[in-house]
Amino acid sequence: MKMREIRAFFSLSIIGFLLIAGCVSVYPPMSVESNPTGLRFEEPPELSPEQEALIIRRTQREQEILSSELNAESAAELALLHNPLIERALETLGMPGFDRLQLVHITNPNFNRGRPPSTMETRIERMSSVNAMTWVIMPALDPIGTLEERSGRIRAADEIVALLFLAKRSWVNAVAAKQAVQYYKDVVTALEAGREIMESMRQVGNATELELLRAQTLYADAVTALTNLEITAAVEHERFIQVLGLWGDDADSVKLPDRLPEIPRSVIGPEGLESRAVSQRFDVHAGRLEGLSGEAGVNARADVRTAWLAYRGAYDLATHSINEIVPLANRRSEEQLKLYNGMLVGVFDLVTDATERIDAVNSALEAKKVFWLAEVELQRAMAGVGVSAVSIQEGQQNGFRPGATYHVH
């Protein structure tokens, strides 16, 4: 990025407002101008060489991330590097112009001697959120200032770290919606072929009018479902772009994978989660500052327990759907096809079976999405920022897992 483009990036919002207001004259640096509303605006100061170098490094990293498909972690990093909310929050913390690359990649050397907590579970307490927390927690919990100032700093720190989890959650929703569209395109193609076959069979008298109408209805319903899924995918993609803080060519260059990652082979256990949460959660530290350590500890334990139960239930539902329900549906379809080839069942039986198999796959895709959202929520709960996004899914109310009992230690 050229230096002229960098300066234009910082001046964009002010220049755009002035042009809209009709102020098209060019003035020397630091000049003051007025508009018809009577408001006066001061042009931003020139960037120092150090500031320009910092922005160049950050921009290079952003372009490096955008050159590949985004995963949940790279999406979170990109949001931290680019979203304008971060700069405003850093200013509130007394850290204007702070190197955001350090927020993501470096542990604050003044926090715990530059070492992350030794009890970290890296699948839950990811380094990006841990590093960001080590930088913002110290100014956020500074007891100096009025109550309003301290509260503002706490909110700003919370917003910075919570944005990481918001970006991950938005990434999961966007990828899941994209995957659902890809699957349903295949469904529509198959059902269209089935409808055409049924129409041909009806013409020669090998199918009833009712069977033809059912095949046509099934295809029409699938087209409707695909249209709704495409709308959802477009909306989720735009929400994801908004969370990243991107626009223009950068927004257009975002690449998402076609499908969510596979479910992990092992689940994260509850051992030690509560004690780690109480010792390291941001809201617990903030509560101690305000003399509310007991209340903060109770809330932290409840938040983590709820998040883990939802996570564990989502894991078991997802693995059950993928490993049991979908394979059974596929085997049933194979048997139905054998019966059809033996002229023991009709075409409508195949059509009915196809709808059941579609439902099974859709349920598995939804269960996988719910699991990844639940893991992000558990990460958020361990950090103690943001607002809980846990929503107990139908089937998880009683802690679903065949032959198992749930308990958080």
Image (spheres, rainbow, N blue to C red):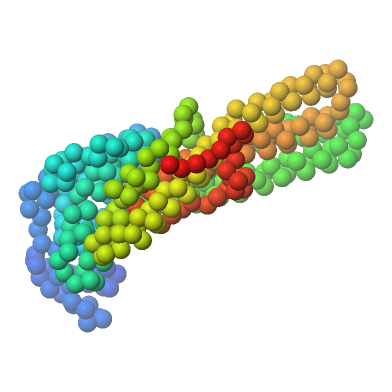
Residue 21: quarter of image: bottom left
Vertical arrangement, residue 55 with respect to residue 207, above or below: below
Name the residue rendered at 73%, 44% in the picture.
Answer: 220
Name the residue rendered at 73%, 32% in the picture.
Answer: 354
Name the residue rendered at 48%, 27% in the picture.
Answer: 265
Q: How many marks?
A: 0
Q: Quadrant of the N terminus?
A: top left
- Image coordinates of residue 26 in percent, x first then y, are 15, 67
Q: Nearer the viewer, residue 274 or 142?
A: 274
Specify whether residue 358 is in view: yes
- Image coordinates of residue 22 in percent, x first then y, are 26, 73
Residue 327: quarter of image: top right
Q: Nearer the viewer, residue 403 or 195?
A: 403
- Image coordinates of residue 27 in percent, x first then y, are 12, 68
- Image coordinates of residue 255 in percent, x first then y, are 40, 38
Q: Nearer the viewer, residue 287 or 71?
A: 287
* 52 on left or right of 327: left
Q: Nearer the viewer, residue 384 or 160?
A: 384
Q: In the orientation shown, which residue stands out farthest toward the right? A: 205
* 211 on left or right of 357: right
Vertical arrangement, residue 231 with respect to residue 355, above or below: below
Residue 409: quarter of image: top left
Specify whether residue 189 is in view: no
Name the residue rendered at 46%, 29% in the picture.
Answer: 266
